[in-house]
Amino acid sequence: MINWFLRRKTINNGDTITLQEIQQSKKVLFALFTRYGDTVINLVVIREFIQKFPKKKYLVLCPKQMEPYVIEFLPKITYFSFNKRNIFQMVKVNKMLQSWGADIGFNPWSHGLESCNFLNYCKRYHCYRDFPRPKEINHYQIVRRYLNLPEVDWAVNKIKSRENYRKILVCPQSTDPSRSISEKKLDQIINNIRQSYHDCEITIAAMDTYFFRSNCNQFKFRKNKLSSKNFIQLIKDSDLVICADSAPLHIAIAFKKHTQVIFLSTKPEIVLNSGSSILNA
Protein backbone atom coordinates (compact mmCIF):
# COMPACT_ATOMS: atom_id res chain seq x y z
CA MET A 1 0.00 0.00 0.00
CA ILE A 2 2.71 2.48 0.99
CA ASN A 3 4.75 1.78 -2.15
CA TRP A 4 1.65 2.44 -4.25
CA PHE A 5 1.14 5.73 -2.39
CA LEU A 6 4.73 6.86 -3.00
CA ARG A 7 4.92 5.77 -6.63
CA ARG A 8 1.91 7.94 -7.43
CA LYS A 9 3.96 10.97 -6.44
CA THR A 10 6.77 12.72 -8.26
CA ILE A 11 9.72 12.49 -5.89
CA ASN A 12 12.69 14.65 -6.82
CA ASN A 13 16.22 14.18 -5.47
CA GLY A 14 17.16 17.80 -4.86
CA ASP A 15 20.68 19.20 -5.05
CA THR A 16 23.64 19.90 -2.77
CA ILE A 17 22.85 22.32 0.05
CA THR A 18 25.46 24.98 0.73
CA LEU A 19 26.68 26.20 4.11
CA GLN A 20 25.24 29.63 3.33
CA GLU A 21 21.79 28.12 2.74
CA ILE A 22 22.02 26.30 6.07
CA GLN A 23 23.04 29.49 7.86
CA GLN A 24 20.14 31.43 6.33
CA SER A 25 17.52 28.75 7.01
CA LYS A 26 15.05 28.96 9.91
CA LYS A 27 13.38 25.54 9.83
CA VAL A 28 15.25 22.25 9.36
CA LEU A 29 13.74 18.79 8.81
CA PHE A 30 15.51 15.47 9.47
CA ALA A 31 13.81 12.34 8.12
CA LEU A 32 15.45 9.32 9.78
CA PHE A 33 14.30 6.04 8.26
CA THR A 34 17.23 3.68 8.14
CA ARG A 35 18.86 0.86 10.05
CA TYR A 36 19.07 0.91 13.84
CA GLY A 37 22.81 1.62 14.11
CA ASP A 38 22.79 4.20 11.32
CA THR A 39 20.01 6.09 13.08
CA VAL A 40 22.08 6.30 16.27
CA ILE A 41 25.04 7.60 14.23
CA ASN A 42 22.71 10.19 12.68
CA LEU A 43 21.46 11.38 16.06
CA VAL A 44 24.99 11.83 17.41
CA VAL A 45 25.98 13.98 14.42
CA ILE A 46 22.66 15.85 14.30
CA ARG A 47 23.33 16.83 17.92
CA GLU A 48 26.57 18.44 16.66
CA PHE A 49 24.60 20.21 13.93
CA ILE A 50 22.12 21.63 16.44
CA GLN A 51 24.93 22.75 18.73
CA LYS A 52 26.44 24.66 15.81
CA PHE A 53 23.11 26.15 14.72
CA PRO A 54 21.11 26.42 17.98
CA LYS A 55 18.64 29.15 16.99
CA LYS A 56 16.77 27.23 14.28
CA LYS A 57 13.51 25.30 14.58
CA TYR A 58 13.98 21.58 14.10
CA LEU A 59 11.66 18.68 13.33
CA VAL A 60 12.70 15.01 13.37
CA LEU A 61 10.62 12.28 11.69
CA CYS A 62 11.31 8.69 12.74
CA PRO A 63 9.73 5.26 13.24
CA LYS A 64 8.05 4.67 16.60
CA GLN A 65 10.77 2.30 17.82
CA MET A 66 13.38 5.05 17.42
CA GLU A 67 11.43 7.66 19.40
CA PRO A 68 13.20 6.89 22.74
CA TYR A 69 16.57 7.47 21.08
CA VAL A 70 15.49 10.81 19.63
CA ILE A 71 14.29 11.86 23.09
CA GLU A 72 17.57 10.69 24.65
CA PHE A 73 19.98 12.31 22.20
CA LEU A 74 17.91 15.36 21.21
CA PRO A 75 15.79 16.07 24.32
CA LYS A 76 14.63 19.59 23.36
CA ILE A 77 13.84 18.92 19.71
CA THR A 78 10.35 18.51 18.24
CA TYR A 79 9.81 15.05 16.77
CA PHE A 80 7.03 13.01 15.23
CA SER A 81 7.17 9.21 15.27
CA PHE A 82 4.82 7.03 13.25
CA ASN A 83 4.38 3.83 11.28
CA LYS A 84 5.38 4.57 7.70
CA ARG A 85 3.43 1.48 6.51
CA ASN A 86 0.19 3.00 7.75
CA ILE A 87 -1.33 4.94 4.85
CA PHE A 88 -3.47 7.11 7.15
CA GLN A 89 -0.47 8.14 9.24
CA MET A 90 1.49 8.86 6.06
CA VAL A 91 -1.25 11.18 4.81
CA LYS A 92 -1.27 12.94 8.19
CA VAL A 93 2.51 13.45 8.13
CA ASN A 94 2.46 14.78 4.57
CA LYS A 95 -0.21 17.33 5.51
CA MET A 96 1.79 18.37 8.56
CA LEU A 97 4.95 18.89 6.49
CA GLN A 98 3.05 20.91 3.92
CA SER A 99 1.82 23.20 6.70
CA TRP A 100 5.16 23.40 8.57
CA GLY A 101 7.15 24.63 5.56
CA ALA A 102 10.75 23.56 6.25
CA ASP A 103 13.50 25.59 4.62
CA ILE A 104 15.94 22.68 4.25
CA GLY A 105 15.75 18.94 4.73
CA PHE A 106 18.13 16.02 5.21
CA ASN A 107 17.70 12.23 5.39
CA PRO A 108 21.17 10.88 6.34
CA TRP A 109 21.82 7.16 5.71
CA SER A 110 18.29 6.80 4.32
CA HIS A 111 17.88 5.33 0.83
CA GLY A 112 14.14 4.63 0.66
CA LEU A 113 11.42 6.50 -1.21
CA GLU A 114 9.58 7.54 1.96
CA SER A 115 12.34 9.75 3.40
CA CYS A 116 12.89 11.46 0.02
CA ASN A 117 9.13 11.98 -0.15
CA PHE A 118 9.24 13.90 3.16
CA LEU A 119 12.13 16.06 1.96
CA ASN A 120 10.12 17.11 -1.08
CA TYR A 121 8.10 19.38 1.22
CA CYS A 122 11.25 21.42 2.01
CA LYS A 123 12.30 24.45 -0.03
CA ARG A 124 15.81 23.00 -0.40
CA TYR A 125 16.95 19.43 0.11
CA HIS A 126 19.30 16.78 -1.19
CA CYS A 127 18.35 13.12 -0.85
CA TYR A 128 21.13 11.12 0.80
CA ARG A 129 20.94 8.32 -1.78
CA ASP A 130 22.19 10.81 -4.40
CA PHE A 131 24.87 12.36 -2.22
CA PRO A 132 28.35 11.46 -3.61
CA ARG A 133 30.15 9.15 -1.16
CA PRO A 134 33.56 7.48 -1.30
CA LYS A 135 33.56 3.69 -1.13
CA GLU A 136 35.33 3.68 2.22
CA ILE A 137 34.75 6.51 4.69
CA ASN A 138 34.04 6.74 8.39
CA HIS A 139 30.30 6.38 9.11
CA TYR A 140 30.17 9.53 11.24
CA GLN A 141 32.32 11.59 8.89
CA ILE A 142 30.07 10.97 5.90
CA VAL A 143 27.08 12.31 7.85
CA ARG A 144 29.10 15.39 8.81
CA ARG A 145 30.00 15.89 5.16
CA TYR A 146 26.37 15.48 4.10
CA LEU A 147 25.23 18.03 6.72
CA ASN A 148 28.04 20.42 5.76
CA LEU A 149 29.71 20.13 9.17
CA PRO A 150 33.50 20.34 9.56
CA GLU A 151 35.19 16.95 9.52
CA VAL A 152 37.53 15.95 12.34
CA ASP A 153 40.74 13.95 12.41
CA TRP A 154 40.02 10.37 13.41
CA ALA A 155 41.40 9.10 16.70
CA VAL A 156 40.19 6.82 19.50
CA ASN A 157 41.17 6.58 23.15
CA LYS A 158 42.28 3.19 24.46
CA ILE A 159 41.32 2.82 28.12
CA LYS A 160 42.16 0.20 30.75
CA SER A 161 39.55 -2.08 32.21
CA ARG A 162 38.60 -1.79 35.85
CA GLU A 163 39.32 -4.53 38.35
CA ASN A 164 35.67 -5.22 38.93
CA TYR A 165 32.49 -4.83 36.89
CA ARG A 166 29.19 -5.65 38.57
CA LYS A 167 26.84 -5.53 35.57
CA ILE A 168 28.09 -6.66 32.17
CA LEU A 169 26.05 -6.46 28.98
CA VAL A 170 26.99 -8.64 26.00
CA CYS A 171 25.51 -7.80 22.57
CA PRO A 172 26.82 -10.46 20.16
CA GLN A 173 24.48 -9.94 17.20
CA SER A 174 24.51 -7.57 14.24
CA THR A 175 21.92 -7.25 11.48
CA ASP A 176 24.85 -8.13 9.21
CA PRO A 177 25.66 -11.80 10.05
CA SER A 178 29.30 -11.34 9.02
CA ARG A 179 29.71 -8.91 11.94
CA SER A 180 28.02 -11.09 14.58
CA ILE A 181 30.04 -12.88 17.25
CA SER A 182 29.92 -16.64 16.75
CA GLU A 183 28.28 -18.85 19.38
CA LYS A 184 31.65 -20.45 20.13
CA LYS A 185 33.29 -17.06 20.63
CA LEU A 186 30.35 -15.95 22.76
CA ASP A 187 30.85 -18.94 25.08
CA GLN A 188 34.55 -18.04 25.38
CA ILE A 189 33.65 -14.46 26.26
CA ILE A 190 31.21 -15.58 28.96
CA ASN A 191 33.76 -18.01 30.44
CA ASN A 192 36.40 -15.25 30.51
CA ILE A 193 33.96 -12.90 32.24
CA ARG A 194 33.13 -15.52 34.89
CA GLN A 195 36.82 -16.11 35.58
CA SER A 196 37.68 -12.41 35.76
CA TYR A 197 34.63 -11.03 37.59
CA HIS A 198 33.24 -13.63 39.98
CA ASP A 199 30.28 -11.71 41.37
CA CYS A 200 29.12 -10.04 38.16
CA GLU A 201 25.69 -10.14 36.58
CA ILE A 202 25.75 -10.94 32.85
CA THR A 203 22.96 -9.99 30.42
CA ILE A 204 22.90 -11.08 26.79
CA ALA A 205 20.92 -8.84 24.42
CA ALA A 206 20.06 -10.20 20.98
CA MET A 207 17.37 -10.48 18.34
CA ASP A 208 17.67 -14.27 18.02
CA THR A 209 17.28 -16.55 21.03
CA TYR A 210 20.09 -18.96 20.05
CA PHE A 211 22.51 -16.38 21.47
CA PHE A 212 20.95 -16.68 24.93
CA ARG A 213 22.58 -18.78 27.66
CA SER A 214 20.86 -20.32 30.68
CA ASN A 215 23.36 -18.83 33.16
CA CYS A 216 22.82 -15.25 31.90
CA ASN A 217 19.99 -12.75 31.94
CA GLN A 218 18.27 -12.25 28.59
CA PHE A 219 17.08 -9.20 26.66
CA LYS A 220 15.34 -9.78 23.34
CA PHE A 221 15.32 -6.88 20.89
CA ARG A 222 11.89 -6.06 19.49
CA LYS A 223 10.82 -3.45 16.97
CA ASN A 224 8.78 -1.29 19.30
CA LYS A 225 9.11 1.81 21.44
CA LEU A 226 9.04 -0.03 24.79
CA SER A 227 11.90 -2.34 23.79
CA SER A 228 14.03 0.64 22.77
CA LYS A 229 13.27 2.46 26.01
CA ASN A 230 14.15 -0.62 28.08
CA PHE A 231 17.39 -1.16 26.18
CA ILE A 232 18.50 2.43 26.79
CA GLN A 233 18.00 1.84 30.51
CA LEU A 234 19.87 -1.47 30.29
CA ILE A 235 22.87 0.28 28.70
CA LYS A 236 22.78 3.00 31.35
CA ASP A 237 22.70 0.43 34.16
CA SER A 238 25.62 -1.60 32.76
CA ASP A 239 29.22 -1.09 33.88
CA LEU A 240 30.75 -2.82 30.86
CA VAL A 241 29.39 -3.46 27.35
CA ILE A 242 30.92 -6.13 25.12
CA CYS A 243 29.55 -6.09 21.59
CA ALA A 244 29.96 -6.77 17.92
CA ASP A 245 29.99 -4.02 15.29
CA SER A 246 26.31 -3.21 15.77
CA ALA A 247 23.91 -0.54 17.02
CA PRO A 248 24.59 -1.25 20.73
CA LEU A 249 28.23 -0.32 20.08
CA HIS A 250 27.27 3.20 19.00
CA ILE A 251 24.83 3.60 21.88
CA ALA A 252 27.34 2.41 24.49
CA ILE A 253 30.06 4.75 23.21
CA ALA A 254 27.66 7.69 23.03
CA PHE A 255 26.79 7.05 26.70
CA LYS A 256 30.55 6.86 27.51
CA LYS A 257 30.33 3.31 28.84
CA HIS A 258 33.38 1.08 29.18
CA THR A 259 33.07 -0.74 25.85
CA GLN A 260 34.91 -3.69 24.37
CA VAL A 261 34.34 -4.25 20.64
CA ILE A 262 34.79 -7.50 18.71
CA PHE A 263 35.53 -6.46 15.11
CA LEU A 264 35.25 -9.22 12.52
CA SER A 265 34.65 -7.85 9.01
CA THR A 266 34.98 -4.09 9.57
CA LYS A 267 37.74 -1.65 10.49
CA PRO A 268 37.59 0.51 13.64
CA GLU A 269 38.52 3.64 11.68
CA ILE A 270 35.44 3.13 9.49
CA VAL A 271 32.99 2.33 12.27
CA LEU A 272 33.96 4.27 15.40
CA ASN A 273 33.33 7.94 15.96
CA SER A 274 36.43 10.07 16.40
CA GLY A 275 37.14 10.58 20.10
CA SER A 276 35.50 7.31 21.14
CA SER A 277 36.90 5.51 24.17
CA ILE A 278 37.20 1.73 23.99
CA LEU A 279 38.88 -0.94 26.08
CA ASN A 280 42.15 -2.46 24.95
CA ALA A 281 41.47 -5.90 23.51
Image (tube, helix red, strand yellow):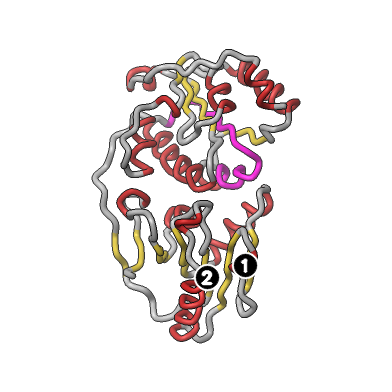
Give the residue drawn at x 53%, y 85%: 199
Q: Quadrant of residue 245?
A: bottom left
Q: Position of residue 4 (x, y in %)?
A: 68, 22
Asked which secondary structure carries label 2, the reply is helix
What is the CA distance from the residue labelled 2 to the residue labelled 1? 8 Å
Considering depth in this image, is 58 or 172 the residue closer to the camera?
172
Q: Quadrant of the C terminus?
A: bottom left
Residue type at mark 1?
A: Tyr
Q: How many marks?
A: 2
Considering depth in this image, is 1 or 256 the residue closer to the camera?
1
Image vertical order of residue 274 relative to residue 87, above or below:
below
Image vertical order of residue 219 relative to residue 251, above or below:
below
Among the two numbered marks 2 and 1 on one chain, the one whose residue lies closer to the N terminus: 2
Query: Mark 1 sits on what residue?
Result: 210
Image vertical order of residue 111 relative to residue 203, above or below:
above
Considering depth in this image, is 223 or 76 the residue closer to the camera?
223
Considering every residue shown, the one lying at the far right of the view is 88
Q: Which mark is residue 171?
A: none
What segment carries the magenta color?
A: 54-71
Q: Position of residue 40 (x, y in %)?
A: 49, 46
Give the residue drawn at x 59%, y 68%: 211
**Is the Cβ of the residue at disc 2 closer than 8 Å to that at disc 1?**
yes
Q: Which mark is residue 183?
A: 2
Please tell me whether residue 2 belongs to the stretch shown in magenta: no
Residue type at mark 2?
A: Glu
Please tell me whether residue 60 belongs to the stretch shown in magenta: yes
